[in-house]
Amino acid sequence: MRKNIVAGNWKMNKTLNEGIELAKELNDILSKNKPNCDVVIGTPFIHLAEVTKIVDKNIIGVSAQNCADKASGAYTGEVSAAMVKSTGADYVILGHSERRAYYGETDEILKNKVDLALENDLTPIFCIGEVLEERESEKHFDVVKSQIENGLFHLSSDEFSKIVLAYEPVWAIGTGKTASPEQAQEMHAFIRKTLAEKYGEEVADNTSILYGGSCKPSNAKELFANPDVDGGLIGGASLNAKDFHGIIVAFD
Ligand code: 13P
């Protein structure tokens, strides 16, 4: 059966020392109170090698927030999937709406990133989600479906079974405006149906689909209680160990 996962996305926050402190604090809390779900923290690149040494990897997985769409070479400033893997990290967040919107990441670019992540034995946490105008004009299902088709449906069934999906409605990210549990369930069920049509019921049933967008301790439980919501991808509330833990315990 699919896993429940609570993953943090620190985005561009925390200096190295601050990140180490946060990882230590979270590791201490979770060593004493074993989580009932998988826990992942997505740190900036430069934190990865240090953070993987600090955390008990049986309890906390470590993720990058991006990787290059090329394997290696003259691409100044880029960080490859192989480099991410060499830090000890096991996950990479790909296709976050901030990368799509601010850094021009297209479906074609994301396809390459997904392939390189899988070749390097990283688990992609692949983000999808519509902007407000798309929801208001009732295009949200089409938008999400095309993001999945264009970014992932070139994968074989075996390859696809390594993917974690994160539905993050862009209008809910960092806005304090969360999707209602009904809106989240409706979209997650649609995503699972889309996966089933392509890869069959078994692969679809085994795929973890996380919700992201203003998820916090006060709303995590009702969001995660939905049958097709298998956890969360958490931005702001992952920057504080107590808040992040408050979301993890939604699975207790
Ligand atoms: P917030 O939890 O801050 O809304 O961010 C969600 C997100 O973008 C996680 O990737």
Image (tube, rainbow, N blue to C red):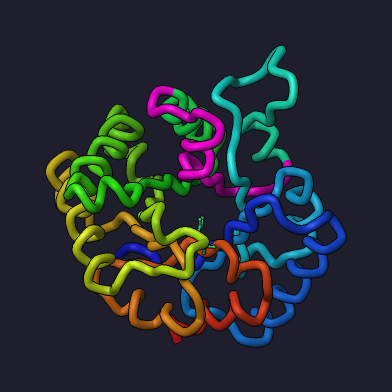
Q: Is residue 17 left or right of residue 46?
A: right
Identify the residue shown where x is 77% and y is 51%: 47
Q: Is residue 128 above or below residue 77?
A: below
The magenta segment is: 87-108
Residue 146 in view in this figure: yes
Rendered position, 170 above or below 26: above
Q: Is residue 72 magenta?
A: no
Residue at the extreme right of the image, as rendered: 17
**Left or right position of 146 against 177:** left
Where 70 falls versus 188 (above or below)? above
In the rendered view of the protein, which quadrant contains the N terminus? bottom left
Which residue is drawn at the image coordinates 46% and 44% (left, top)?
97
x, y percent for residue 35: 54, 79
Give the image location of residue 116, x and y in percent: 52, 28
Q: Nearer the viewer, residue 5 or 178?
A: 178
Asked whether 100 falls inside the magenta stretch, the response is yes
Can the viewer see residue 195?
Answer: no
Query: Where is residue 110 drawn, in percent x and y?
Result: 45, 30
Give the quarter of the figure containing the C terminus: bottom left
Identify the residue at horizontal 23%, vertical 48% (top origin).
Answer: 140
Q: Nearer the viewer, residue 95 or 30?
A: 95
Residue sitting at x 65%, y 62%: 57
Q: Give left or right: position of 145 versus 179.
A: left
Among all residues in the image, which is located at the extreme left? 197
